[in-house]
Image (spheres, grey):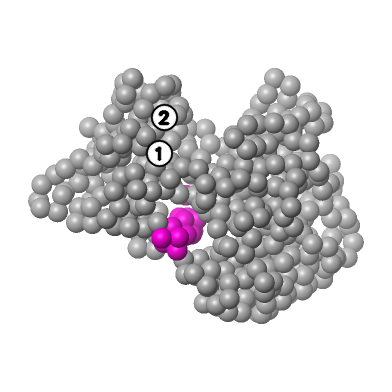
């Protein structure tokens, strides 16, 4: 969290970062003003590996003053990692945070969890004595709480791992728009087409928008519902937090549902002018490793996979490309040039001869193309546009994943 973004409540935080507890953590703390509670939990679990069936992760249950707040899935493995979570509205006074392992939702082969807390922050309105900016507080106070899709509970699939928001002007005021990155989608677009047209196998979805007038009053709420419809939100709130239920296999949300397991990653603000939404993943590079691990565990990696099979080769063989285009009703593909392993140069096409693998949306986009295992480092790129001009495409960047499935440095590609 940036300095000045929040009131950092240090009551009882002396000694907060201690030797991690095993499978259970509890800490008393005190806050001196009402606000929105955010914590950074630092945790890992022995033998955990998101890519290994039976050892995927440990599930933790978080409660404040004995009241359930959310579950946290330790998807990032054995080494302790930071998880920033929303814990809801809190009153001034003494409180207690409890975090404990949930055996029935944890992988059978996962070992003990080490649990610590890096920080407990409270965001308060700017009118208070040491408050956050109004936008920071407002965004946190309205951040969605996501109830898990019932067929994902205990199955380590389609996990919501990141949330961000944007603020956009409207004729009546402003809209706060919240989006979520899930580790995958069990329904919807096939894996090889996802890579060609989106440059990822994670699922990125707008989930909730709330419009405020000039005085800060809520005048409209909406969600992305089944079928990608955007109906008004008519569900319940917890304080100002909307309670959303992930209801389809491609992670659309509804006003209600049967699940009692919920997640609430704390949102981060992003301005995505001139870049793609995938930049959010770039800032949290570990998300690529989770993406790769889930694909491997679900049997979707096949180095001999043909286009249209729904499977993909090793993600480290892909060149990830970002560009921007104002084109409408046009299909965009790109090609990268690399040695073919026999000393010659060859162009490798992102659409791989499949029309459905072309990118067909305006704005900034990602796509990816696999290279043969024997190919050399790519050195050039070109764009092809159906029903438009390639000169209208702006090339932003390209990269490949390293041995740990993390984004490597930008490739120096000459545009042809």
Residue 110 left/right relative to 325:
right
Residue receiving disc 1: 197
Q: Is mark 1 on a helix, strand or loop?
A: helix
Q: Which residue is drawn at 82% across and 31% down?
A: 217
Q: In which quarter of the image is residue 25?
A: bottom right
Q: Position of residue 117 (x, y in %)?
A: 69, 68
Q: Is mark 2 on a helix, strand or loop?
A: loop
Q: Is the residue 51 above or below the residue 383 in the image?
A: below
Q: How far apart are marks 2 and 1 (CA)?
A: 8 Å
Q: Which quadrant holds the C terminus?
A: top left
Residue receiving disc 2: 360
Residue 31 left/right relative to 86:
right
Residue 96 left/right relative to 253:
right
Mark 1 surroundings within 10 Å by alpha-carbon count, few (fewer than 14), some (14 through 19), many (20 or more): many
In depth, the one of 109 and 212 nearer the eye is 109
Chain part drawn in magenta: 281-299
| Residue 283 magenta | yes
Q: Is the residue 156 above or below the residue 327 in the image?
A: below
Decide: marks 2, 1 in contact (CB < 8 A)? yes
- Asked if one can make out residue 299 in the rendered structure from this viewpoint, the answer is yes
Q: Residue at x 23, y 57 (%)?
A: 373
């Amino acid at each position: 969290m940036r300095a000045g973004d929040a009131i950092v409540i240090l009551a009882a935080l002396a000694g907060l970062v201690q030797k991690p507890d095993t499978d259970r953590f509890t800490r008393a703390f005190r806050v001196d003003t009402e606000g929105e509670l955010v914590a950074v939990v630092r945790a890992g679990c022995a033998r955990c590996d998101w890519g290994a069936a039976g050892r995927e992760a440990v599930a933790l249950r978080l409660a404040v003053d004995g009241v359930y707040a959310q579950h946290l899935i330790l998807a990032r493995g054995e080494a302790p990692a930071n998880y920033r979570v929303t814990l809801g509205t809190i009153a001034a006074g003494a409180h207690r945070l409890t975090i404990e392992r949930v055996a029935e939702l944890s992988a059978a082969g996962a070992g003990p969890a080490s649990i610590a807390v890096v920080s407990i922050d409270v965001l308060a309105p700017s009118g208070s004595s040491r408050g956050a900016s109004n936008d920071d507080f407002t965004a946190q106070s309205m951040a969605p709480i996501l109830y898990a899709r019932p067929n994902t509970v205990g199955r380590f699939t389609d996990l919501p791992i990141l949330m961000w928001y944007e603020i956009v002007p409207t004729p009546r005021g402003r809209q706060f728009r919240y989006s979520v990155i899930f580790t995958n989608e069990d329904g919807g677009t096939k894996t090889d087409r996802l890579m060609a047209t989106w440059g990822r196998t994670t699922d990125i979805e707008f989930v909730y928008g709330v419009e405020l007038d000039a005085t800060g009053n809520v005048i409209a709420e909406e969600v992305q519902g089944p079928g990608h419809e955007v109906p008004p939100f008519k569900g319940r709130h917890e304080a100002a937090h909307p309670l959303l239920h992930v209801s389809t296999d491609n992670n659309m949300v509804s006003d209600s549902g049967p699940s009692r397991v919920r997640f609430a990653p704390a949102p981060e603000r992003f301005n995505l002018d001139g870049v793609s939404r995938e930049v959010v993943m770039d800032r949290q590079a570990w998300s690529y490793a989770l993406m790769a691990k889930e694909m491997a565990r679900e049997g979707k990696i096949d180095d001999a996979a043909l286009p249209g099979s729904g499977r993909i080769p090793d993600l480290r063989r892909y060149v990830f490309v970002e560009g921007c285009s104002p084109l409408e009703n046009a299909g965009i593909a790109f090609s990268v040039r690399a040695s073919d392993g026999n000393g010659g140069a060859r162009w490798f096409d992102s659409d791989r001869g499949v029309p459905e693998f072309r990118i067909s949306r305006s704005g900034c986009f990602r796509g990816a193309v696999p290279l043969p295992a024997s190919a050399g480092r790519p050195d050039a790129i070109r764009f092809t546009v159906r029903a438009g001009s390639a000169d209208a495409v702006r090339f932003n960047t390209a990269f490949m994943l390293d041995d740990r499935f993390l984004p490597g440095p930008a490739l120096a590609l000459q545009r042809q």
